[in-house]
Image (cartoon, rainbow, N blue to C red):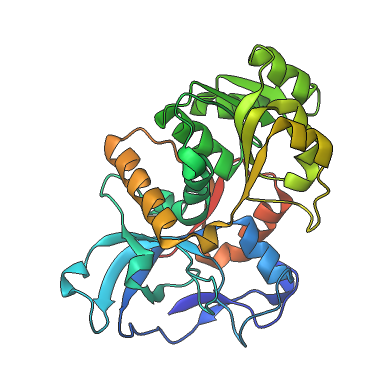
Amino acid sequence: MKAIWYERNGAARDVLTYGEMPAPQAAAGEVLVRIHASGVNPSDWKTRSGSRPISAPRVIPHSDGAGVIVAVGAGVDASRIGRRVWIWNGQWKRAFGTAAEFIAVPFAQAVPLPDSVSFEAGACFGIPALTALRALLTDGGVAGQSVLVAGGAGSVGHYAIQFAKRLGAKQVIATVSSQAKAAHASAAGADACIDYKREDVGARVKELTGGRGVDRVVEVDLTGNIGLLRDVLAQDGLCAAYGSNAQEVRIPFSPMLVSGAAIRFFIVYELSPAARAECETTLALFLAEGGVQHAIAKTMPLSECVAAHELVEAGTAMGNVVLTVP
């Protein structure tokens, strides 16, 4: 099969190889999926560059993907053969991910993909869509709440804006860094956008919420924005933090203590079975309803994986970068 792999950590151009590898087989409890699209996420280039030590002598990157089940292992219903699916955790604690023509994964990690949804969109669900849903569904959900989505034009943020509205949030505010990103977030349904490079985020949030603050923050960079929480959260508000640009976070204890605020930490790779099932069920409902916007910034062939990694690493793409597998 055609595949992308690396055998050491380093820059994309130095370590990523495109070539032929033996196709995997479906073991007991697994399905073999013919990949049609592979999503490239920030965690993919970070892992490749060395944020985590290389986990095997050879690694096929990417956790997200979508395709068609072509074979099943022992114990898996053969009726699943021919079904369209999207994949989560393809390369989490495993050597071989979705940047290849085929992947074998436990059957639960191949989730039904409606015929109305493209493979390219399906390759955006495992990390961006499920992260957005977990941030909104945890701790009672967002019905009737005011929600601030940090990085509203990002892959997670774009879904979070839409899903917050569908889950009954009364107000969704997004932070952005340009007029183009504000337009992108507004098109997803944001009621207001705050340019954090030009505006006082805390003051604008208070203005937009009548001085009260928001009930929930969906946070992409807790280290960078921890100081804002005391200014933007309402009494007893919640910050759902799924990312941070540094490993250490200094929390202003006294202001947070007085506010009664809480921080819910989570990583989408390690959701509990119950939390993941809740997210998958909710996503399936939204897809069945129709109208979900999938922000795909660029599609590229698998052979151009180096350029795709460099594009995601540069942080200039407004939306997901997806590799198509011929």
Task: Place residue 247 in its image quadrant.
Answer: bottom right
Say left or right for 256 vs 18.
right
- Tell me: residue 32, above or below residue 260: below
Question: What residue is drawn where x is 41% and y is 49%?
Answer: 279
Q: Can residue 295 be seen in this view?
A: no
Residue 107 is situated, as x and y percent measured from the top left of the image, at: 32, 71
- Tell me: residue 266, above or below residue 262: below
- Tell me: residue 195, above or below residue 254: above
Give the quadrant of the C terminus: bottom left
Question: What residue is drawn where x is 52% and y is 44%?
Answer: 132
Task: Place residue 226 in its image quadrant.
Answer: top right
Q: Which of 52 and 316 is in front in this view?
A: 52
Residue 95 is situated, as x and y percent measured from the top left of the image, at: 54, 80
Residue 223 is situated, as x and y percent measured from the top left of the image, at: 78, 47
Question: What residue is drawn where x is 72% and y is 45%?
Answer: 221
Say left or right for 228 vs 167.
right
Give the quadrant of the N terminus: bottom left
- Tell me: residue 56, above or below residue 285: below
Q: Which of 210 and 119 is in front in this view?
A: 210
Task: Place residue 25 in its image quadrant.
Answer: bottom left
Residue 135 is situated, as x and y percent measured from the top left of the image, at: 54, 44
